[in-house]
Amino acid sequence: MHIIDIITKKRDGGILTAEEIKFFIEGYTKGRIPDYQISALLMAIYFKGMTNEEATNLALFMRDSGDIFNLDSIEGVKVDKHSTGGVGDKVTLVLGPLLAYHGAKVAKMSGRGLGHTGGTVDKLESIPGYQVELSVEDFKKQVSEIGLAIVGQSGDVAPADKKLYALRDVTATVDSIPLIAASIMSKKLASGADAICLDVKVGHGAFMKTVEEATNLAELMVNIGKLAGKKMTAILTGMDEPLGHKIGNGLEVYEAIETLSGKGPKDLVDVTVEIGAHLLIQSKIESSFEVAKEKLHNTLDNGLALNKFRELIVAQHGDPSIIERKEELLSNKTVEFKSTENGYIETIDALKIGVAASRLGAGRETKEDVIDLFVGIDLHKKIGDRVQKGDVIATLYVNEKGVDEALALMKQAVNVGPNKLSIDLIKKTIQ
Ligand code: URA
């Protein structure tokens, strides 16, 4: 087999066989095929697309390029969720304890943030002492004992994806639905859960700008997961404004604690409960979706899952008194962003808000950047809220960096106008 024939076939719109996909994935991962030929192939895939079967094979061979976790020793259905990346998305921090409280087994490997989207691992590191690295044995033991572990990616998961993603990043081939689907699913399939709920974000702040594109991506990922023997659900949720009020690492842990105490913002609660209900059904803990949702709402309203969050922190060597001292998760230097007009908030561009938080130091521009865990943005107003001139729209928790730039971005991101708009948050479910 020759790589040039594979490139030619895809360039001309052909369908690659499983053997051809295996050949280029293995050849690239092991350094036998150079970047320039894989770049050409990626561009051909970008323009000609892939069938479901090709994308599934791509995901499976990328999964097989590294470690695959076996969680069979943990009793019950192991559940996982994945978000395609949003701003202010702290769902995992609330959902994990909530599901574990209801008896589910949540085995979650999370990532770090890059660019305008945050990462759960960085957020958890704002808790003093919290260890994001556990051995695989300790990870499994913890999920068995308390129903929940949230750790960083350990081992060498899908190295083919790591290499391909880095190449896609510099060859303008990230935005390809089959490549995104195979990339995400290769890692999800390697992490060993039995049931996976995907939260595919749609809107300004997301990879997918339209419901149509997001539907195609979600359907493809659900198909790939099912073909690999997993129970799959995807929901499409809006990312036209950040989720919840707080953006930034410690700030998001703060908001997760509030949400687990029954004082969470409606949009964050609704997305968490929706994903949670799907995973309780797939775990066979509940049989009615509506009943599952009602129970999850009640648990949050009554603060019943907060203790699970405490157990998680203790199990991962963190200091649980942060729950009572949550003000320490916020920088003590603040700047206010005020309205210059009367009217309603019409837009809060999630992408720009994410970039603003990143400029304050909450995010990384490159993998090597050190982030400031206690800076970020607290949006007091959301789309549809009334504001008067002089009202504080947001408080910026700041340190030394980026205040003027962040304020300028906030100004571009937030629009006040005469229209009271409402947002359609949960747009679609794909199973
Ligand atoms: N996230 C991933 O893991 N891969 C992609 O290709 C895009 C988003």
Image: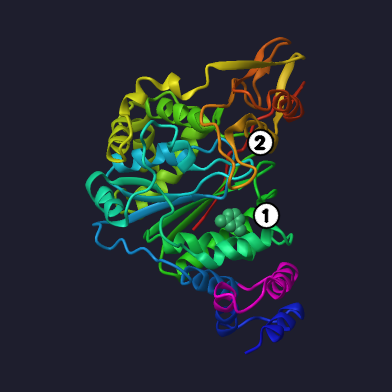
Q: Position of residue 53 (x, y in %)?
A: 57, 75
Quarter-wise, where is residue 384 in the image?
A: top right
- Res. 220 visible in picture: no
Camera-nearest residue between 67 and 32? 32
Q: Could you tell me which quadrant the N terminus lies in?
A: bottom right
Q: Which residue has dot 2 on it?
A: 350
Instruction: Examine the structure image and report whether residue 31 is included in the region drawn in magenta.
Output: yes
Which image quadrant shows ligand 1? bottom right
Checking the image for residue 212, the label placed there is 1
State the predominant SS element of the stretch in magenta: helix
Magenta region: 25-51
For disc 1, does the CB lie below 8 Å from ligand 1? no
Secondary structure, mark 1, is helix
Left or right: 47 in relation to 164 = right
Residue drawn 71% across the image and 70% down it: 39
- Work out whether mark 2 precedes mark 1 in sequence or the reverse, and give the earlier one: 1
The type of residue carrying mark 1 is Glu
Q: Position of residue 4 (x, y in %)?
A: 71, 84
Measured in 3D between alpha carbons, the distance from the residue under mark 2 to the one under mark 1, in whole angstroms, is: 20 Å
Camera-nearest residue between 421 and 117? 117
Residue drawn 74% across the image and 59% down it: 172
Q: Position of residue 274 (x, y in %)?
A: 46, 43
